[in-house]
Image (tube, helix red, strand yellow):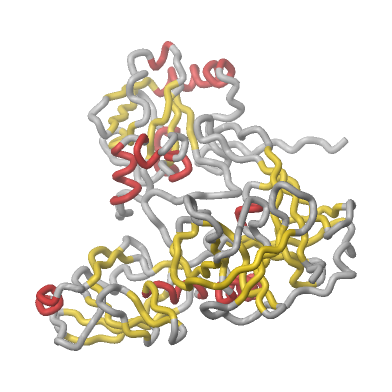
Amino acid sequence: MAYPEVIRVFATSQDPDFDGPWQARTPSNSTGSAVVIGPGLLLTGAHVVANATFLQVQKPSQPDKAIARVRAVCHDTDLALLEVVEPSDFLADIEPAELGPMPRLRDQVAVVGYPVGGEEISITEGVVSRIEVQRYSHSQRHLLAVTVDAAINAGNSGGPVFGNGKVVGIAFQKLTGVDNIGEMVPPPIIRAFLDGVELGKRPEIPALGITTQNLENPLLRKQLGLTATERGVVVLHVDFAGSAATILHPRDVITSIDGLPIANNGTVQYMGVHRTRYDVVLGHRYTGDVVQLEIKRDGVARDIELVLKPWMPLVPRSRYDQPPLYFVYGGLVFQTLTRDYLTTWDKWWNKAPKEFLNYYYLGYRTAEQHEVVILTQILADEINVGYSHLYNEAIAKLDGVPPRDIEDFVARLSAARGVVEIETTSGGMIMLDAEEVRKANPRILTRYHIPRDRTVGLPGSMPVPLRATP
């Protein structure tokens, strides 16, 4: 088979620089694969076009390229929908591929794309070896994935996986340290993404907003009020302002979700075949949808409904297509703690400050703290002499009050008068005269070639001036 519907994607991307959040890194070029799914429409992986500034697409065995743009993207599910801009009829001679059903174990599949090392289309064949919830490396979300024993290499990403002539997945990642084991986004998640685009839904996967523990210990089940035949998971924590806030309580036992009984190891029988994590049901849901739960609280069975909301961890996971939030005040550079900032350390899970890792792995949002504001560096100037050792610390208080988030912190600091006091979580003390900072800021920004003292959109930021078009 020639697979004319499989298209090559050329992306120019420019990633943010989290060490210098006012600037971007040098643009880089990469390639990926995509599949035609409609008139002028291509389906590919979100990581193929993340932070992209310019996109081109190329048909098999043809030198000419067309300009494309992102129509919709869901970074949670690593899926993106592209549309051809110029020429608009570039894909008119190609019959769109059809999305097929969920594959079964041992089904024969073909991974089709343009891996690095050549210019022509590549086809690798294999079988479906596993279907369960996996961690999507692009978003750090746990969603349903299909494992195949066919090679998925750089450049293959975003390309289709065919079974019986239909698209049964989009290749998105490979397992490290092993050969010929790759993973693809399955049809239920692809359909939910495409349907969501048509319906105008938010391009994200919602979350239950809880932390749970499996109940494989019989005494623990008994103490929580379960009978000998009842199974489930126990709620340990309920996220502030999340889907389950004020509805579920710690020590509630969830026995079923959307009518699927939950086993003591936290799994359900999904689609009647695949035993995997109980939150698998979220992969084809949208923000605002309702999920049905059966719980036991203090030994009493209850039926409840949760209106699904976005996942809102204390430390945001990888973010794309948006600049980092920063604020320069008297040479002190403040940012929001994010996973992106943590990755500025090589082997960050070992080398990043332990305080930051604790926030990442164990921290939860509260009414008082929605984000962690951190001091990432100090640009030397006479106004901040003596504070150079206090970088890479979280901010505990501003004038005696903990910051709720970066917007609250910037608004209060921008409006401050007289002497302001900033306390770090190690107990470090910074005092600055607000009027002297206002005089020093232009000098510091000029000295370090920083165009703006804060991210556009933060309190007090000025709009970016429009340039005349020549």
Rendering coords of residue 444 (x, y %): 52, 18
Q: Which is more toward the observer, 241 or 79?
A: 79
Vertical relation: 247 (above or below) 462: below
**Picture quarter with the C terminus:** top right
Q: Relative to 464, is 349 on the left or the right?
A: left
Q: Which is more toward the observer, 362 or 331?
A: 362
Q: Quadrant of residue 29?
A: top right
Residue that appears at 38% across and 39% down: 373
Q: How many marks do you count on the picture? A: 0
Q: Quadrant of residue 338?
A: top left
**Picture quarter with the N terminus:** bottom right
Q: Relative to 214, is 121 on the left or the right?
A: right
Rendering coords of residue 164 (x, y %): 68, 80
Rendering coords of residue 227 (x, y %): 15, 86
Vertical relation: 435 (above or below) 25: above
Q: Quadrant of residue 2?
A: bottom right
Q: Relative to 419, is 24 on the left or the right?
A: right
Rendering coords of residue 136 (x, y %): 49, 59
Residue that appears at 35% across and 46% down: 404
Q: Which is more toward the observer, 250 or 226?
A: 226
What is the residue that sits farthest to the top in this orientation? Answer: 382
Q: Which is more toward the observer, 419 or 204?
A: 204
Residue that appears at 32% across and 49% down: 369
Vertical relation: 147 (above or below) 468: below
